[in-house]
Amino acid sequence: MGFTVAEKLIAASLVDGEMKKGNRIGIHISQTLTHDVTGVMTYLEFEAIGLKRVKTDLSVSYIDHNILQADFKNPDDHRFLMDITSKYGILCTKPASGICHQLHLERFAKPGKSLLGSDSHTVNAGGVGMLAIGAGGLDIAMAMAGEPFYFTMPAIVKVVLIGELPSFVSAKNVILEILRRISVKGGLNTILEYTGPGIQTLNVTERATICNMGAEAGATTSVFLSDEITRYWFQAQGREQDWVPIFADEDAVYDRVIEINLSEMEPLIALPHQPDNVVLVRDAVGIDIDQVMFGGCTNSSLQDVMSIAHILAGKHVHGNIDTALYCGSRQVMTECVRRGIIEQLVGSGVRVMEMFCGACNGMGFAPPSNGKSVRTGPRNFIGRCGTDSANVYLTSPEVAAASALTGKITDPRDLGLTPWKYTMPSQFVIDERMFLQPKDIADDAPVRRGPNIKPLPEIESVPDELTGETLIKVGDDITTDHIIPAGAHFLPIRCNIPEVSKYAFKVVDESFSARAKEAGSGFIIGGHNYGQGSSREQAALAPRYLGVRAVIAKSFARIHLANLVNFGLLPFVFVNEADFDHFDQGDSLSIDTTVLQQGMQYAVCNHTKGIDVPVVTPLSQDELDIIRVGGRLNWIKQRNS
Ligand code: SF4
């Protein structure tokens, strides 16, 4: 039996376990990436491991999220990252050089290699046939220390694309269609592998756009093959030597098949507040909007900006609309400048911002109260844009541009525009001076730390009995944005757990943090897909810091589950989902944890209701052993002592 592309990629990096669906497997990691929101903690964790240099082929620290320098916190973090990465042999970008995923695709992604990134959209690099996976910062620190990365061997879903996208219907619509069909939970424990004749019509950045938002479906990763189209990208980036061909075997077997006829696709849009709340644009046409954001790691390529410019050419954005553009990299910006596109967009009334994630996670350009914002980024979770009462719509650059012109959600096909086709340059502008090279040898130069960078909290081992109250009960699809908020006020304090923990669950219940701290010990009750969204490990560490000892849910998102393990927080799932109804906030609970054993059933004693509820842990024995000692950092310190 032959291999799929995904299986070939995993097999090339496999160091532990058998590649059988559902098995726990370990892979060697060739490359890592971090950004400034996750990177500070990641490098503190790497420092705590105690090695002199990273053991990866390449590790890159990007500074692309916390770019606003309203006070000392973000610039202190930037300086810390530049100092510490130089010391440990890690490349570091200067602030606002571009969004990590676009930059990595341009300069470092390699077909056939593995990449672990402390950001869920690391999967973007699947567009060149790389095994690219998002994870918590501590997993990245471990990978930099040469440790394998463990995950569950996923099912491989074959996504067959046929036909060709019509004019004004771009790649973003393909992944919105996937989300419309399978939801934000439909990709859990799967890899989405794209194939079929339709992929021959998609260039690398279009493929990356599709892979990028596979994260929204909960997929472990998404991959395309590596073919002549991929080779052309590497030639244009001046690094053809990094290209290798990768194809699925003809007799490869897939677990499931999804077919999409690109020729029949229409413009789509995700309504607030989930990326799978997808409808046809023609069913949303006419909704008045307040702002448009072009950019985000999904849609900030040269093609995206040129497509926007084509629609806005010779026109001005609507008088009521605030419009901003964030190019994905300096390369994209320079290519646009050379073509006169930036001048044209400025003339059309677009605010041209720096090259970073920008408004995607609320770092500026927040909508007004109750505002409606149309965005080309990957996420529209409540509050993520910085305004809790705002509504964010996710769509393609073409729909966003058309809507910017009219002030209402608009189908670009209704504007009577001339169709336009992108031709990728045969040679992109290449300028690597924004990458700071690490020192050649390890040294003991001091690393400058700002007062906002606090040491990692100590985590105790798990006692023989967990007791406390239900501190909060939440429903399905709770995101890490719900648990630890995004936005310009909160992102700069992510490296300060005592401070950021004050805002845990702010979007859901502002009293949570104070109640949890006062209780000192307790539980979270969750629905399906608990912890979906970003890889931020603060969503595990901050609740643990506040005294949460276990999360009992119907199911967990992959990265968050791993983060719970990393920080010594026990996850349980209900044996009978209906038992979720037997819990209320404030109930007094206990669980006997004398033995932590894979597959064992536990009883949650609800003393308030006078019932016992059966639960199991979804973890392997190795993971339970890690939790027992208070998480992965404690575990590795004990192992190395
Ligand atoms: Fe940046 Fe938004 Fe992409 Fe996250 S989702 S990497 S904040 S652009």
Image: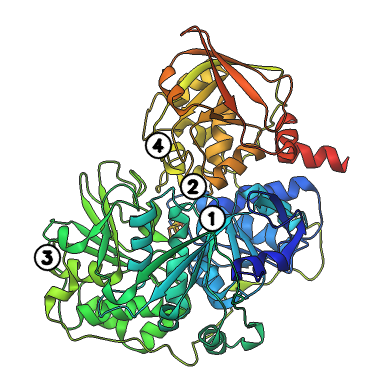
Residue beneath the point at 60% across and 52% down: 135
Tell me the amino acid under the disc marked 2: Pro
- Ligand 1 shows up in the quarter that is bottom left
Q: Secondary structure at mark 2?
A: helix
Report the residue marked by disc 2.
Answer: 492
Q: Are marks 4 and 2 in contact (CB under 8 Å)?
A: no
Check residue 319 in the rendering and tell me which mark sits there, or answer none: 3
Gap between marks 4 and 1 measured at Cα: 20 Å
The residue labelled by disc 4 is 476
Residue occupying the point 70% across, 54% down: 149
- Amino acid carrying label 1: it is Thr
Residue closer to the observer: 252 or 107: 252
Alpha carbon separation for disc pair 4 and 2? 28 Å
Nearest-to-viewer mark from 4 and 1? 1
Mark 1 vs ligand 1: CB below 8 Å: no
Image height check: is 573 above or below 610? below
Q: Tell me the SS state at disc 1.
A: strand
Q: Quadrant of residue 295?
A: bottom left
Mark 4 surroundings: few (<14), some (14-19) or many (≥20) residues within 10 A:
some
Which mark, residue 190? 1
Viewer-side label of 3, 4: 4
Per the model, the C-alpha gap separating discs 2 and 3 is 33 Å
| Observer-nearest of 3 and 401 | 3
Provide residue 6's location: percent of width, then percent of height: 60, 66
In this view of the protein, which residue sits in the foreground, 309 or 220? Answer: 220
Label 1 Cα neighbours within 10 Å, binned few <14 / some 14-19 / many ≥20: many
